[in-house]
């Protein structure tokens, strides 16, 4: 499953595709949410763009997002403080269907 509860928030399992034509949610990729970003995987730029995208999509401030693992990998675990599985799943479903 791409989403799990952790403490007072959730962990999202992300498969990140840098240097894409546009930033978007591609869909479910195994146990991950596949997200493409325009930024290259240099100096954390792809990670930053991913967090900015998720922040805008979910309506949470960027300071609530933390990359827990995978800073230099395509597979990432991103912690979102104060998020609930229901609100994140609803936002992701809206993004994938649009």
Image (cartoon, rainbow, N blue to C red):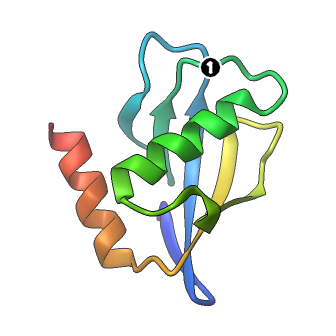
Please report the residue visible at 51 percent of the width from the left and 54 percent of the height from the top. 31
Residue 58 vs residue 18, the one in the foreground:
58
Please report the residue visible at 42 percent of the width from the left and 17 percent of the height from the top. 22
Please report the residue visible at 50 percent of the width from the left and 81 percent of the height from the top. 82
Residue 28's quadrant in the figure? top left
* Horizontal relation, residue 42 to residue 22: left or right: right
Q: Is residue 86 above or below residue 50?
A: below
Q: Locate residue 56, reporting x and y percent.
A: 40, 48
Q: Quadrant of the C terminus?
A: top left
Residue 68 visible in this rendered orientation of the protein: yes
Residue 64's quadrant in the figure? bottom right
Q: Secondary structure at mark 1?
A: loop
* Horizontal relation, residue 5 to residue 70: left or right: left
Q: Is residue 48 above or below residue 88?
A: above
Residue 34 vs residue 71, the one in the foreground:
71
Q: Residue furthest left?
A: 98
* Horizontal relation, residue 62 to residue 36: left or right: right
The residue carrying mark 1 is 39
Residue 67 vs residue 30, the one in the foreground:
67
Q: Is residue 82 above or below residue 39?
A: below
Q: Locate residue 95, reporting x and y percent.
A: 25, 44
Q: Locate residue 8, reporting x and y percent.
A: 57, 89
Within-10-Å neighbours for mark 1: few <14, some 14–19, many 20+:
many
Q: Residue furthest top?
A: 21
Residue 39 vs residue 16, the one in the foreground:
39
């Amino acid at each position: 499953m791409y989403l799990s509860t952790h403490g007072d928030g959730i962990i999202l399992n992300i498969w990140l595709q840098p240097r894409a034509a546009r930033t978007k949610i591609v869909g479910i990729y195994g146990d991950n949410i596949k997200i493409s970003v325009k930024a290259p995987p240099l100096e954390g730029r792809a990670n930053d763009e991913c967090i900015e995208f998720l922040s805008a999509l979910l309506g949470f401030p960027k300071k609530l997002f933390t990359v827990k693992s995978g800073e230099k990998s395509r597979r990432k675990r991103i912690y979102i403080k104060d998020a609930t599985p229901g609100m994140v799943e609803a936002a992701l479903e809206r993004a994938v269907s649009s």
